Amino acid sequence: MSDTNVVTLVEAKEHLRVDVVDDDTYITGLILGAVAYCEERMKQCFLTTTVTKYLDRFPGCNYIEFDKSPLISVVYVKYTDYLGVVTTLPTTEYVVDTHSFVGKIVLAYGKSWPTTTLTTVNAIEIQTTAGYGAAAAVPQMIKQAILLLIGHWYANREAVLIGTISKKIEMAVDDLLGLAGARVNV
């Protein structure tokens, strides 16, 4: 596991203070789970990822927001009419906003969404690229939140702790993710 995940196996084992290879498979699973948890909490993709969004119709406003950030680019916007004809919306019809926290495409000046009668379900397909790029570009607070979850899950392999005063570890993770600029749903 080199630059293919936000936190490497070596980094996780250093955090856990584990020197043996016996738990490598288990720790790798914890890494994947913690990254998925944090990505979902933040509504982000950490590494460069292709994301496809489907809409039943064009919005009543002049923009479409994306579910995953940070938005890198829009690959295409396609729509299917009621006859099944697929059309790609020309890039001259919209502007891509990659600078806002929530990425979006906005109609270009003087443009409007197509008025073609669309197919009934998933008529619009928008493919985007989202993420920070490589693992090195992911903010350190996000990496720390991932390591915190890995440590908690490694030490506590059951759903409930008995006989101890406990505090929900996710609160600390949410705090770190919030400081990293997240849309955390607490």
Image: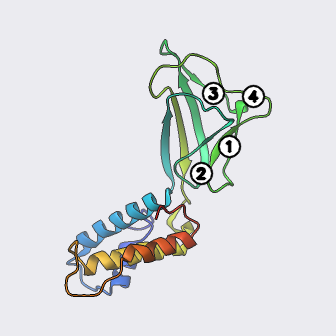
Q: Quadrant of residue 9?
A: bottom left
Q: CA distance from mark 4 to mark 2?
A: 22 Å
Q: Amino acid at mark 3?
A: Leu
Residue that carries the numbered disc 4 in the rendered image: 111
* Disc 2 + disc 1, Cβ < 8 Å: yes
Q: Is residue 32 shown left or right of residue 43? A: left
* Disc 4 + disc 2, Cβ < 8 Å: no
> Going from the N terminus, do you reach mark 2 or mark 1 first?
2
In the displayed structure, 152 sits above or below 129; it is below
* Disc 3 + disc 4, Cβ < 8 Å: no
Q: Where in the figure is residue 142, as x and y percent of width and height?
A: 50, 71
Residue that carries the numbered disc 3 in the rendered image: 89
Residue that carries the numbered disc 2 in the rendered image: 71
Task: Sort mark 2 into few (<14), some (14-19) or many (20+) by Cα contacts within 10 Å.
Answer: many
> Going from the N terminus, do you reach mark 4 or mark 1 first?
1
In the displayed structure, 56 sits above or below 3; it is above
